[in-house]
Amino acid sequence: MALSPTPLEEAPPALAPGRRLLLKREDAHELGAFKWRGALPSLERYRDAGATAVVTASTGNHGAATAWAAQLTGLRAVVYVPEQASQAKLELLERLGADVRHAGADVDEAKDEARAHAERDGLPFFEDGAEPAQFGGYAAIGREIVEQVGERPALTIVPVGNGALLIGVARGLGGDGALGVVSAGAPVMALSVEAGRPVDCGPPATFADGLAVRVAVPLAVDELVKLGTPFVSVSERSIARALGAFAAAGIRVEGSAAAALAALETIEPPSGAVVLVVTGHNIDDDLHRRAVEEPDSFAD
């Protein structure tokens, strides 16, 4: 199924004074996030293999994309979510007709329950970040950026949860020119890529639920090691301040999207255009308000 490219916009000058900053607005999709790009080709593959339903686990955006793609492909979507999942994302899941199951303290515990359900019922388990079809879907973002800019930009900054988005964007850019950003409270992918293998990490401590991964997906680690894409880490407070800067510019984003802007404070940007992948805008009102009004209440 062919779908229209998302917009690439000049950022409001206040977000990066003196720099050419561009925003790849994945939040412009009807789901408010980028995950549809990986979910649709994955569910098409499951359907073509004879599946009638699919099981997954998510903090919200991946689950919503799975439910949305299930509607388009005629499948049933069972989505496991952690107990403290975002209310805004839960409401979106329900509107999309997902069979929502609550399990575990974080997405990795929810994933264990989802995998057991899939094995018990003989259904495909759609693990976010472990399905190669996702990488191809996300590669379209990198290709669109190159087409919309007219050349490969100097740098494209990509928020990293399980790493699938970074893999796809880097491939779409031609294998170079991407920078991954993780929360200091959820560094497992950066640490795993540095080690060359999945490493153990403590429970994620980030309000950016799209970055809140505790267990690295081995396939994603392997692919990122091959690509050699660099990473930076940003604090919770810097993410909150970046979210507030977006809000002041009239753009509502969730924490993972704000992390891309926060990364600019940790690097010396190259000359030329810098692109931020704005991953989504699905965030609870109270959390958004706290980040905007009380950024210093988050860990530095």
Image (cartoon, rainbow, N blue to C red):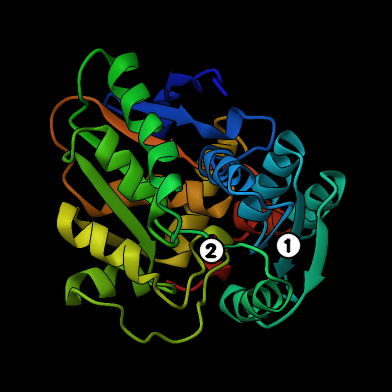
Q: Residues within 10 Å of mark 1 (few under 14, many from 20)?
A: many
Percent across and percent down for residue 169 are: 33, 39
Q: How many marks?
A: 2
Name the foreground residue: 128 vs 116. 116
Determine which residue is flagged by label 2. Answer: 127
Residue 78 in view: yes
Q: Is residue 3 above or below residue 16?
A: above
| Residue 158 numbered tag | none
Name the foreground residue: 228 vs 233. 228
Residue at x-position 47% and y-position 66%: 236
Determine which residue is flagged by label 1. Answer: 79
Q: Is residue 195 above or below residue 212?
A: below
Percent across and percent down for residue 40 are: 58, 39
Residue 250 in view: no
Q: Quadrant of residue 29?
A: top right
Q: Secondary structure at mark 1?
A: strand
Q: Quadrant of residue 63?
A: bottom right
Give, as a three-letter code, the residue at label 2: Glu
The quadrant the N terminus occupies is top right
Q: Are marks 2 and 1 in contact (CB under 8 Å)?
A: no
Percent across and percent down for residue 115 are: 62, 75
Percent across and percent down for residue 230 are: 19, 56
Residue at x-position 48% and y-position 48%: 258
Please indicate whether residue 139 sits to the left or right of residue 52 in the image.
left
Residue at x-position 67% and y-position 73%: 114
Give, as a three-letter code, the residue at label 1: Val
Residue at x-position 31% and y-position 83%: 199
Please indicate whether residue 171 sits to the left or right of residue 297 in the image.
left
